[in-house]
Image: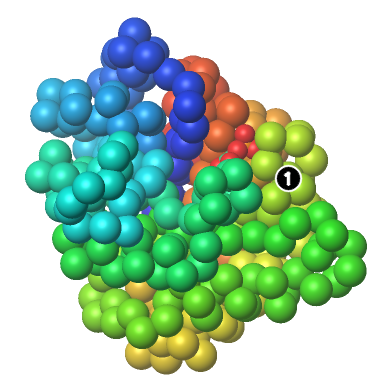
Amino acid sequence: MKYIIANWKLNGSKPLLNEFLNQFATYNSHNYVVLCPPHLLLSDLDSINIDNFFMGSQNVSEFTNGAFTGEISAEMLADNKIFYSIVGHSERRTLLAETNEKINIKIKQLLSHNITPILCIGENLEQRDANTFKQAIDLQLEKAFKNIKIDDKTIIIAYEPIWSIGTGVIPEISQINEVHEFIKTIMKQLYPKNVNRFKIVYGGSVNLKNYQIILSSSLVDGVLVGGASLDSKSFYEICNFKN
Ligand code: PGA
């Protein structure tokens, strides 16, 4: 059972969402689908009743409530039956000053409302070229999970090498496997008793040409799809992946 997650970023519209809902009305694959459109499109959730099909937020505030213009809290997401949220996407880290410390607080907010975090981590090209990517990933994980108890909650970690996002360049499958195995090792150190609660998905230029080889790896629990998730037919095909 894989997780197929769509990150629409700042794209989409009500007609596009309706197109997706029509496309998925007969969805009967066993993979979990999580559609993360912009917040305003999340309000249609009550009309959705498709097996294994969920909606997720692209972000959440680190604050509970108060004078924080433009923010949306974990409580508000839970009120609207949104039980997945992306956190720490590299675009937010680099363009919107999202620090590891903020990400840590956001994960705590999400878990306290029973929302599954989809934590994005990954190295930039410089770190890949300098062969320091493992240190970079280790640091992101240690800081993201500082003082967090997960108990029986599920956490999704999306390995998204920044150099692969939106570029059409994907790592070799051996490189993806190597990092997924590395992430698992770190999580085992941090959570020896709950390591199976962590699902590790890959993100970065996933499309119709490469999803099968990526999803066929037993070390890959799913994919996070950006650009290719905006086309309902392509995304539907990816969601119907069978091993
Ligand atoms: P991409 O984006 O599939 O367009 O590369 C992935 C992401 O940013 O999550």
**Residue 29 appears left or right of 208:** left
Element marked by disc 1: helix
Residue 62 placed where, x, y %? Answer: 32, 58
Q: Identify the amino acid type marked 1.
A: Ser
Residue 135 placed where, x, y %? Answer: 71, 78
Q: Residue tagged by mark 1?
A: 164
Residue 100 at least partly seen: yes
Q: Look at the picture and state if 194 lies above or below 59.
A: below
Out of 206 and 66, give the one closest to the viewer: 66
Residue at 29% x, 40% y: name it: 69
Q: Quadrant of ligand 1?
A: top right
Residue 52 at least partly seen: no
Question: Label 1: how many residues lie within 10 Å, few (<14), some (14-19) or many (20+)?
Answer: some
Q: Look at the picture and state if 237 lies above or below 139.
A: above
Residue 134 placed where, x, y %? Answer: 72, 75
**Residue 215 appears left or right of 163:** left
Is the CB atom of the residue marked by disc 1 within 8 angstroms of ligand 1's nearest atom? Answer: yes
Residue at 28% x, 26% y: name it: 40
Residue at 58% x, 65% y: name it: 219
Out of 2 and 227, give the one closest to the viewer: 227
